[in-house]
Image: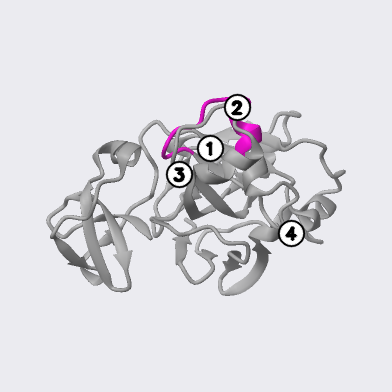
Amino acid sequence: MLQRVQATDGRDLLVRREGDDLAVLGPWDGGRVLDAVPDASDERLEVAGTTPLPFLREGAKILCVGLNYRPHIEEMGREAPEFPTLFAKFVDSFVGPSDDIVRPADVDQLDWEGEIGVVIGTEVRAASVDDAADAALGAVALNDVTSRGHQYRTTQWMQGKALDSLSPIGSIVAPLRDDLTIETRVDGETVQQGRLDELVFGVADLIAYCSSIVRLRPGDVIATGTPGGVGHGMQPTRHLQPGQLLETELGGVETLRNRIR
């Protein structure tokens, strides 16, 4: 598995994680290293002596898919889409795996949306579904934290989705597999669970569709959608409050732990 970490001497590194051992591949260098992932050097680090950093290339495109788990479609009162529902987030929308999420003063309906993100590993444009399957580098944990009040001001969602520094993303990119799970917990309570093979539009379909619209480059991310169990779909509705702990776990790989303040 690939991971981005900060060493004790302050270096920002791309490493290959093998248990508790990290093989240094090279400097992160804004994520440009992802264009051609190097072989491991002789340098080894221990996990305990490093700090996880968000696996986001500088200038990356983050394309998000709405309404891609049937339970979430139903809880939001929507029809199943004929095509993937896309919107964008930006690098500035994200924080790291253990950073605090600072709720802006004008946001009072902050909601969770745990998701499996697919990191692109090969440049791809207008790919077929068969070719698209080979374009993924792997999966990363993320949470599409959303300001529902902003989202529903208009029929366009982006203003509620792309707020600065609200959405955590993981440091580890794991292999894609059908039984890969995502789980969201609020103060230890499990509120969402989903599996990659439950998507309405699967990974290859999403890469093919997105690449028909825009060129995908190494380090770009497709957020594949959230399972049922968002706070806005509950009766009564629930939203994140200061002091609460939001956890987003990519099955057995990495858990994001972000305190709301």
Question: Foreground mark, 2 or 4?
Answer: 2
Residue interval drawn in magenta:
207-220
Marks 2 and 4 sit apart, C-alpha to C-alpha, by 31 Å
Is 75 in front, or is 26? 26
Q: Secondary structure at mark 4?
A: loop
The residue under label 1 is 163
Comes first in the chain, label 3 or label 4: 3
Image x and y of residue 143, in percent: 55, 53
The residue under label 2 is 126
Label pair 4/1, CB-CB below 8 angstroms: no
Marks 1 and 3 sit apart, C-alpha to C-alpha, by 9 Å
Marks 4 and 1 sit apart, C-alpha to C-alpha, by 22 Å
Comes first in the chain, label 2 or label 3: 3
- Left or right of 87? Residue 50 is left
Question: Foreground mark, 4 or 1?
Answer: 4
The residue under label 4 is 228
For residue 259, above or below residue 211: below
Q: Secondary structure at mark 2?
A: loop
Neighbor class of circle 1 (other Cα within 10 Å; few <14, some 14-19, many 20+) is many
The residue under label 3 is 94
